Image: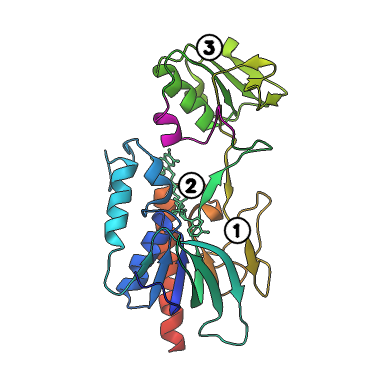
Amino acid sequence: MNLSDQTVDALIIGAGPAGTQCAMVLDNQHIKTAIVNNAPMAGGLQCYNPYQSDWIATSYKQTGSALADIMEHNLQRPNLLYYGNTYIDALIENTSDTKSRFTVLAKTKDAKFHIHARYVILATGVTPRMGNLTHHSGFIFGPGKNITETDFTDKKIAILGGGDNAFENFTYIQSQKARHIDLYAKKIIARPDLCIGIPENQIHIGDVHINQEMVSVNDEKYDLVCVFYGWQAKYFDKLAIKQELTKNNKGYLVINGFCQTSHDSIFAIGEITHRPYPSIVQSMAQGMIAGKKIASNLSHSA
Ligand SMILES: Cc1cc2nc3c(=O)[nH]c(=O)nc-3n(C[C@H](O)[C@H](O)[C@H](O)COP(=O)(O)OP(=O)(O)OC[C@H]3O[C@@H](n4cnc5c(N)ncnc54)[C@H](O)[C@@H]3O)c2cc1C
């Protein structure tokens, strides 16, 4: 990939299901598009999903990693500027130039360059919420490969969180022959069917005191603590734009039916917008809608 400065009509930040779908729609409509992804492969969270889908009509029985391979393949297009392993940490608006209204600083391991764009599409997804904990040995944050690549045999495990991920992973870790598991939560908000079969005396509801140095919860020591505190929207270090983007009370971006944020030239798609039932399907649908809307806007302004 050519790492010199570029000017495009549409810049997508994030190549998960949302960003990848959006890039394909824009590229099909011959819109000059760049997509930047801070990971070696496209696919976003699906790169870390080892499970087979049992409900998505078009990808039944495919693992998340297989879907990520397909997304990576679909971004290899002659006119699409696709930058893998590239991080965007700043988005700056230049109000005097509509054609290259936004500038981002893109960083790879060895280079830095700018991309100027008329429209920006935020597709940076979410990251596991850490509460007031930090990365520390003995602690695992969020579901996926973090969990499935850990050996739980004969270990004493604490699970923190009362949502679906906490209960799903209780069952998974139990199946991996853990010696003992305790689940700690302020309250239970998981789907009732996920709680079936989990012994009540291993669920502890109420205040939770964690000592990261000791790897202990409520003064009980564990081999591993698995934290499932949900997710939070992923933003940049620096966002210098003429008007603040409206967020909801959980910190996710608010969009209209065309995936436009409160700024008419910034779109947001996928989990950063927190729709009901966040999923690959939702993310791809939003990617498609944003791509079509931007293509339509550009054709009317040409
Ligand atoms: C274990 C697991 C299992 C799942 N199972 C299913 C399932 O069976 N079915 C289903 O529909 N959904 C499932 N999901 C949820 C699904 O993966 C997400 O809904 C979907 O990936 C969200 O897509 P997205 O494009 O919004 O964001 P993401 O997938 O999070 O992609 C965001 C991308 O943006 C990149 N990025 C972030 N910040 C920057 C930056 N500053 N610069 C450059 N790039 C950046 C990231 O590297 C990432 O590649 C699962 C998730 C997990 C973790």
> Crowding at label 2, few (<14), some or many (≥20) Cα neighbours within 10 Å?
few
Which residue is the site of mark 2?
A: 278
Instruction: Provide the residue span drawn in magenta.
Output: 136-150
- 282 to the left or right of 262: left
Give above or below for 46 relative to 214.
below
Residue type at mark 3? Answer: Pro
Q: Provide the secondary structure element on which disc 2 rests.
A: loop
User: Does ligand 1 reach within 8 Å of label 1's beta carbon?
Assistant: no
Residue farthest to the bottom?
302
Residue 127: percent from the left, percent from the top? 54, 46
Residue type at mark 2? Answer: Pro
Residue sitting nearer the eye, 188 or 76:
76
Which residue is the site of mark 1?
A: 253
Q: Earlier in the sequence, mark 1 or mark 2?
A: 1
Residue type at mark 1? Answer: Leu
Give above or below for 293 relative to 43.
below
Image-quadrant location for residue 211 = top right
Residue 277: percent from the left, percent from the top? 49, 45
Q: Provide the secondary structure element on which disc 3 rests.
A: loop
> Crowding at label 3, few (<14), some or many (≥20) Cα neighbours within 10 Å?
few
